[in-house]
């Protein structure tokens, strides 16, 4: 089998919180693992520009030590009769936010040109929101070997996938952020099973487009790529 050259980037942090797209108010829950649009955003921060989905294939594993709810104070605003923003008369608000602690992201990308940007990132990558700062622990070139089956760790896997536990989520594949002065536009949405990142259990799986990294501790450790980019 012909290997695919790739980069293995390890990122770590203190907290992560990937906002669930269907949660607008109330307790802010987090998806168990980042979406592919989250990861493209991290790469874009390091690159200093908007990185498109067509520029690289992506695979990842995401681990955390634990998760819990924290309290967060907010500054509430309102619009006055002149159309100006001003503080809400009722003062600050407070709400709960789900946080995953001590995240570790093993990121695999096939565009080797990004190696230099991870050594000298333009901006700070984040595990979700701007306060969830990530730091880059290592960057190395490896090979990804195609395999028909292997053991899968916490990641996003296209749903349905029997025998794999996790939260079924509908997440954007990427964001378009090319028009100055306009909000970002979402690309297509994929339905995934977001595996639980706090477990060390791996699950045996057999499907197309599976790869194991050459630097894995065992040969049957696998990672997989996004399905909606002309790959699955």
Image (cartoon, rainbow, N blue to C red):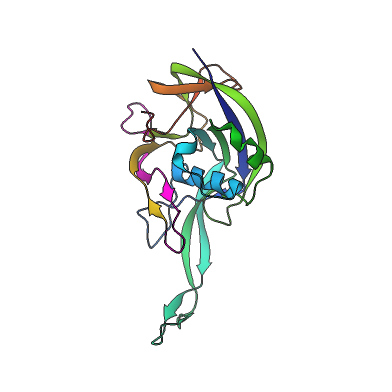
Q: Magenta region, mostly helix, strand or loop?
A: loop
- Decide whether residue 169 is among the magenta residues: yes
Instruction: Give the number of callouts.
Output: 0
- In percent of width and height, residue 80 lies at 41, 85
Give the farthest residue toward the top: 1
Compared across the picture, whether 58 is left or right of 112 comes to: left
From the image, which quarter does the C terminus lie in?
top left
Do we see residue 35 in this rendering?
A: no
- In percent of width and height, residue 218 lies at 57, 18
Do we see residue 186 in this rendering?
A: yes
* Vertical order, 127 against 219 (above or below): below
219 and 43: which one is in front? Answer: 43
The residue at the point 48 percent across, 68 percent down is: 94
- In percent of width and height, residue 50 lies at 51, 49
Q: Which residues are magenta?
A: 158-183
- In percent of width and height, residue 101 lies at 57, 46
- Decide whether residue 193 is among the magenta residues: no
The residue at the point 63 percent across, 35 percent down is: 115
Give the farthest residue toward the front: 179
21 and 186: which one is in front? Answer: 186
Compared across the picture, whether 225 is left or right of 123 comes to: left
Compared across the picture, whether 70 is left or right of 122 comes to: left
The residue at the point 60 percent across, 46 percent down is: 46
The residue at the point 50 percent across, 43 percent down is: 39
């Amino acid at each position: 089998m012909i290997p695919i050259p790739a980069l293995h980037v390890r990122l770590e942090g203190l907290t992560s919180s990937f906002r669930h797209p269907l949660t607008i108010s109330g307790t802010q829950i987090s998806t168990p693992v980042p979406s592919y649009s989250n990861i493209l955003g991290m790469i874009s921060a390091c690159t200093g520009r908007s990185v498109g989905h067509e520029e690289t294939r992506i695979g990842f594993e995401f681990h955390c030590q634990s998760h819990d709810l924290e309290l967060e104070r907010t500054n509430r605003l309102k619009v006055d009769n002149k159309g100006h923003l001003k503080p809400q008369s009722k003062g600050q608000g407070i709400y709960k936010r789900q946080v995953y602690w001590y995240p570790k992201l093993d990121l695999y990308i096939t565009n080797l040109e990004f190696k230099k940007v991870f050594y000298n990132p333009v901006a700070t990558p984040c595990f979700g929101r701007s306060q969830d700062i990530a730091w880059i622990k290592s960057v190395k070139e490896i090979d990804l070997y195609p395999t028909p089956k292997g053991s899968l760790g916490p990641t996003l896997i296209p749903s349905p996938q029997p025998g794999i536990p996790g939260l079924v989520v509908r997440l954007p594949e990427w964001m378009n952020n090319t028009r100055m002065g306009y909000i970002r536009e979402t690309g297509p949405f994929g339905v995934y099973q977001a595996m639980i990142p706090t477990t060390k259990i791996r699950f045996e799986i057999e499907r197309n487009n599976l790869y194991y990294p050459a630097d894995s501790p065992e040969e049957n450790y696998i990672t997989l790529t996004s399905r909606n980019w002309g790959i699955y």
